[in-house]
Image: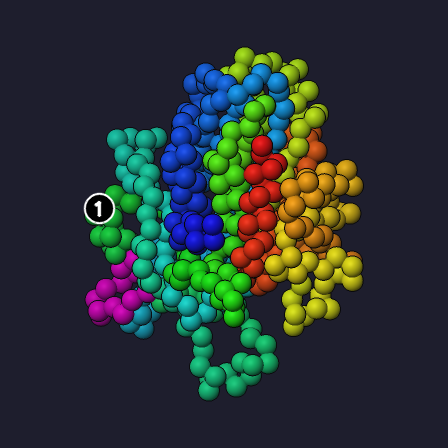
């Protein structure tokens, strides 16, 4: 299971690639692709998926019996990092630099002195303006790095590093011949994909850590890997859905993009994507709006996203009574502010489900003097008017270029998803 997760992480260096890796996992499990804009004819026992704008993936299975019911597991395909700006090539003092901007709430210092690469979507000239050719691309090898300033040039480096999001964080990509200017980047990109620079109209390129995940710890009990937030959740949702078909009702996995920048986009959780998906599914099953309203009233949305584990070096940052530890099971999150979705009833339902299936779980709440993060759970459940609860695996170093978790917690999360989607 954990090796599958590490392979999945390697296959998902951009949100587009997360969606594609998910699509491959579902296809291998017999899910059929559906296209938006055509009526869907759905059969009992059927398993289907569709993508939205390349980086959101929506999958569902239909029960083999006619009794209805609705359960949805939601997670996000994106992760903090950097995105390459347009006109990104920057020739300076014989170096070829790439102009990037931060994406999401990343820890800047964790990206210094690391092997980095680029992956995402490149848009090529098509037959007319409205028909460009979209291609997924991953350099899949170390390509860039953001070198730190030597300590001799900054004697105060160990007293708290000051990093400017523009001037300190520009990756180095090449050593340039004298006559080569800013065009080096586009020319290199074009050569890599076998096209001319003038054919590249645009791109969404993600800067990612070109290192694979690894097990560590005296007994191999930890996983250190990039993008654990939130590919742990994506992988648990997809493998649980692919592993079985429920007897009754509709089981949905909704994987949205842009959670790390607020979710308010066409393929984000705060969009009409999920309501539209459910309407299309119920129409395809020849059910009407009343049937959907009934199922939403009785249904449940599980929002799956990484949680903060208790950090042994900073244990005063944890709440006095809700202190999830790595290796002690998945985390049920609560926040009075509703930055995490859930109420007494929904958290009780999920902890009871864990108890029924002998799945270890623990609770998380922010310290009242530290606001903490948020997830897509409340937004997605407000869009639908459906009961919801936030859960996830506990991590250390969340939003660092490499994050840390316990092997056994991924197993607990996947088992909960299997029980929930049954
Ligand atoms: Zn997340």
403 or 409, which lies in front?
409
Q: In the image, which residues are magenta? A: 173-185
Figure check: 45 above or below 142: above
212 displayed left or right of 322: left
- Percent across and percent down for residue 221 are 53, 63
Measured as percent of width and height from the top left, residue 280 is found at: 52, 21
Residue 396 figure quarter: bottom right
Instruction: Return the x and y of residue 397 as percentages of the image width and height.
Output: 57, 63
- Left or right of 366, for residue 307: left
Q: Determine which residue is flagged by label 1.
A: 195
Residue 156 part of the magenta segment: no
Which picture quadrant has residue 174?
bottom left
Residue at (52, 86) in percent of width and height: 155
Q: Where is the C terminus found, in terms of image quarters?
A: top right
Looking at the image, residue 375 lies above or below residue 316? above
* Magenta stretch, main secondary structure class: loop
Q: Secondary structure at mark 1?
A: loop
Magenta span contains residue 178: yes
Give left or right: position of 202 versus 341. Answer: left
Residue 262 seen from this side: no
Residue at x 35% of width, y 64% of height: 144
Q: Is residue 274 above or below residue 402?
A: above
Image location (x, y in percent) of residue 68: 62, 20
Rendered residue at 53%/21% (across/down): 64
Near mark 1 (Cα within 10 A), the count class, few <14, some 14-19 or many ≥20, is few
Residue located at (43% from left, 45% from top): 18
- Residue 355 in sight from this viewpoint: yes
Viewer-proximal residue among 183 and 266: 266
Instruction: Give the number of marks.
Output: 1
**Relative to residue 421, is residue 321 drawn left or right?**
right
């Amino acid at each position: 299971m954990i090796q599958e997760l590490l392979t999945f992480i390697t296959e998902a260096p951009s949100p587009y690639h997360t969606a594609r890796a998910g699509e491959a996992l579902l296809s291998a499990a017999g899910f059929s692709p559906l296209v938006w804009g055509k009526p869907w004819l759905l059969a009992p026992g059927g398993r289907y998926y569709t993508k939205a704008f390349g980086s959101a993936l929506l999958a569902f299975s239909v029960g083999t019996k006619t009794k209805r019911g609705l359960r949805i597991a939601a997670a996000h395909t994106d992760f903090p990092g950097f995105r390459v700006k347009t006109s990104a090539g920057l020739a300076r003092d014989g170096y070829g630099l790439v102009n990037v901007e931060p994406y999401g709430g990343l820890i800047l210092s964790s990206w210094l002195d690391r092997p980095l690469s680029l992956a995402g979507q490149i848009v090529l000239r098509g037959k007319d303006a409205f028909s460009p050719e979209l291609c997924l691309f991953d350099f899949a090898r170390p390509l860039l790095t953001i070198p730190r300033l030597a300590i001799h040039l900054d004697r105060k480096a160990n007293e708290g590093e000051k990093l400017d999001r523009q001037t300190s964080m520009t990756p180095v990509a090449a050593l340039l011949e004298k006559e080569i200017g800013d065009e080096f980047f586009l020319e290199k990109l074009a050569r890599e994909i076998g096209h001319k620079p003038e054919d590249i109209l645009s791109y969404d390129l993600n800067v990612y850590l070109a290192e694979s995940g690894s097990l560590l710890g005296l007994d191999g009990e930890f996983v250190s890997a990039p993008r654990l937030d939130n590919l742990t959740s994506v992988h648990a949702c997809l493998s649980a859905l692919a592993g079985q078909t429920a007897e009754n009702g509709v089981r949905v996995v909704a994987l949205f993009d842009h959670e790390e920048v607020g979710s308010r986009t066409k393929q984000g959780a705060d969009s009409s994507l999920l309501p539209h998906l459910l309407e299309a599914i119920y129409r395809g099953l020849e059910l009407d709006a009343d049937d959907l309203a009934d199922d939403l009233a009785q249904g449940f949305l599980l929002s799956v996203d990484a949680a903060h584990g208790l950090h042994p070096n900073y244990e005063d940052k944890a709440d006095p009574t809700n202190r999830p530890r790595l290796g002690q099971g998945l985390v049920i999150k609560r926040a009075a502010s509703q930055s995490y979705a859930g109420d007494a009833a929904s958290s009780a339902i999920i902890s009871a489900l864990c108890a029924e299936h002998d799945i270890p779980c623990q609770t998380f709440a922010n310290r009242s003097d530290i606001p903490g993060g948020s997830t897509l759970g409340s937004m997605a459940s407000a869009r639908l008017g459906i009961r919801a609860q936030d859960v996830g695996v506990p991590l250390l170093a969340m939003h660092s270029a490499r994050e840390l978790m316990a092997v056994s917690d991924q197993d607990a999360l996947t088992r909960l998803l299997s029980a929930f989607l049954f």
